[in-house]
Amino acid sequence: MALSVQAAKNTEHASLRRWLVVTALLGAGFLGVKGIEYGMEFGEAANAQGAQARFYFLYFAMTGLHAVHLTIGIGIVAWLWRHAKRFGAAYHAPVEVSGLYWHFVDIVWVFLYPMFYLIERYSK
């Protein structure tokens, strides 16, 4: 996404579109991996009780909310791709603001990942 912002600032429409596609594909790939992971973990969560049930509730709620925001981000990136010719050195604010949103969603994952995947592994 950062490369998309730079391409918009430099009025490089082809490069902007290419980086937006890469961004959307990486986001969609992440959602695909999470979907497969959800499928594997849903059976375990259905039989969970007590602390394990609370963990799965928080896990699915927080990562699910993250996935919703990522899906919104992919939609925004698709809109930017469709309107890429509008953006240039004098008008690149929508790409820049969308980049801020995309990176905010990224940084949320930076905190969710260790909370759900690493803490238990290293706390024993």
Image: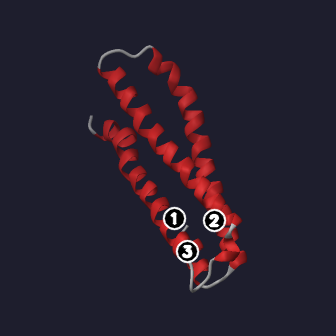
**Label whose residue precedes the other's in the sequence (1 or 3):** 3
The mark found on residue 80 in the picture is 2
**Label whose residue precedes the other's in the sequence (2 or 1):** 2
Mark pair 2, 1: CA separation: 9 Å
Mark pair 2, 3: CA separation: 11 Å
Task: Tell me which residue sits at (45%, 21%) in the image.
Answer: 45
The image quadrant where one finds the N terminus is bottom right
**Residue bearing the label numbered 3:** 5
Per the image, label 1 sits on a secondary structure element best described as helix
Residue 117 horizontal side relative to residue 85, left or right: left
Badge nearest the viewer, 1 or 3 = 1
Q: Amino acid at mark 3?
A: Val
The mark found on residue 118 in the picture is none
Mark pair 1, 3: CA separation: 9 Å
Mark 2 neighbour density, 10 Å: few (under 14) some (14–19) many (20 or more): many
* Residue 2 in the image, given as x and y percentages of width and height: 53, 71
The mark found on residue 98 in the picture is 1
Q: Amino acid at mark 1?
A: Ser
Task: Tell me which residue sits at (66%, 76%) in the image.
Answer: 86
